[in-house]
Image (cartoon, rainbow, N blue to C red):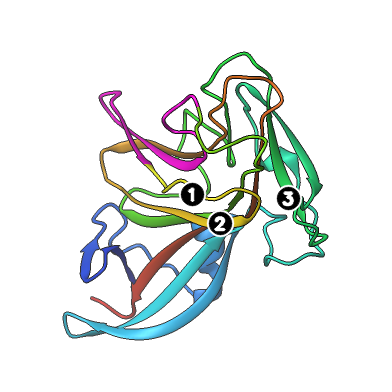
């Protein structure tokens, strides 16, 4: 049988007892096990506590759930439950020809965002308890929008986790410091065994209507370790 082990942070490993001993079968089946929108991006071998590990880098890519490239078409259905923004698919404002996600404020609230794959009520994007994840992408802020959002979470990717007592735990990506160019942003987080919900929001964060913020090349990564043939 196989044992699934997660990298909880660099240099630290933990075994998820809830699924220990559950067979994952052929490695090709792991993406389906983790969620239908996952793909296997890389595989390597490491040694942990005397066992050779198959190191699987899993990626959920909401850009048509495929590789990042300019030929894919973004689907706004992957970014449901917008709040205080309209969500559109537009050409890259930088002129690359790539289609990108545009969030435009409606002027109703500074708590302006959309979700990636859904919000409250579930562990979204195939995330599981015991998993360590990184949500990454790029953000473009026009100079007309500016770098001083009204909401402190503005211009960021925010990971939400809810404890089973209802307490929310949040972690934000860094914010861009320049306008009119694409800036990489990412946020890493751990979904503990007592987290019953986990989801991602993309924040605009402005109150005034017509403020535009763009995101592209979004993906969720998780490193999963499979120890084969553990009795």
Front in this rendered view, residue 4 or 61? 61
- Report, in whole angstroms, how far the alpha carbon at label 1 lies from the one at label 2: 9 Å
Q: Position of residue 11 (x, y in %)?
A: 21, 71
Residue that label 2 marks: 183
For residue 214, side relative to residue 109 (left or right): right
Dot 2: element: strand
Q: Position of residue 84 (x, y in %)?
A: 62, 21
Q: Earlier in the sequence, mark 3 or mark 2?
A: 3
- Report, in whole angstroms, how far the alpha carbon at label 3 lies from the one at label 1: 20 Å
For residue 42, side relative to residue 90 (left or right): left
Task: Spot the residue most to the top.
Answer: 108
Dot 1: element: loop
Residue that label 3 marks: 100
Q: Position of residue 2 (x, y in %)?
A: 34, 72
Residue that label 1 marks: 177
Single out the mark in the foreground, 1 or 2: 1
Number of numbered discs present?
3
Q: Position of residue 18 (x, y in %)?
A: 28, 52
- Report, in whole angstroms, how far the alpha carbon at label 3 lies from the one at label 2: 14 Å
Q: Earlier in the sequence, mark 1 or mark 2?
A: 1
107 relative to 70, above or below: above
Dot 3: element: strand
For residue 157, side relative to residue 5 (left or right): right
Q: Is mark 1 in CB contact (under 8 Å) with mark 2?
A: yes
Q: Quadrant of residue 65?
A: bottom right
Q: Which residues are magenta?
A: 150-171
């Amino acid at each position: 049988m196989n044992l699934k082990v997660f990298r909880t942070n660099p240099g630290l490993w933990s075994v998820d007892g809830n699924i220990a001993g559950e067979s994952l079968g052929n490695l090709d089946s792991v993406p389906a096990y983790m969620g239908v929108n996952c793909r296997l991006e890389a595989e390597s071998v490491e040694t942990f506590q005397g066992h050779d590990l198959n190191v699987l880098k899993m990626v959920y890519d909401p850009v048509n759930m495929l590789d990042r490239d300019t030929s894919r078409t973004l689907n706004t259905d992957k970014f449901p439950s917008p709040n205080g923004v309209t969500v559109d698919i537009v050409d890259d404002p930088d002129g690359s020809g790539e289609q990108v996600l545009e969030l435009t404020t409606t002027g109703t609230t500074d708590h302006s965002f959309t979700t990636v794959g859904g919000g409250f009520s579930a562990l979204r994007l195939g995330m599981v308890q015991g998993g360590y994840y990184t949500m990454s992408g790029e953000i473009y802020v026009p100079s007309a929008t500016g770098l001083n959002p009204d909401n402190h979470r503005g211009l960021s990717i925010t990971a939400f986790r809810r404890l089973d007592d209802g307490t929310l735990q949040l972690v934000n990506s860094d914010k861009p410091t320049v306008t009119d160019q694409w800036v990489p942003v990412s946020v890493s987080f751990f979904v503990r065994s007592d987290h019953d919900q986990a989801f991602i929001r993309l924040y605009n964060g402005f109150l005034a209507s017509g403020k535009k913020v763009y995101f592209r090349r979004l993906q969720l990564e998780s490193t999963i370790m499979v120890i084969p043939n553990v009795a």
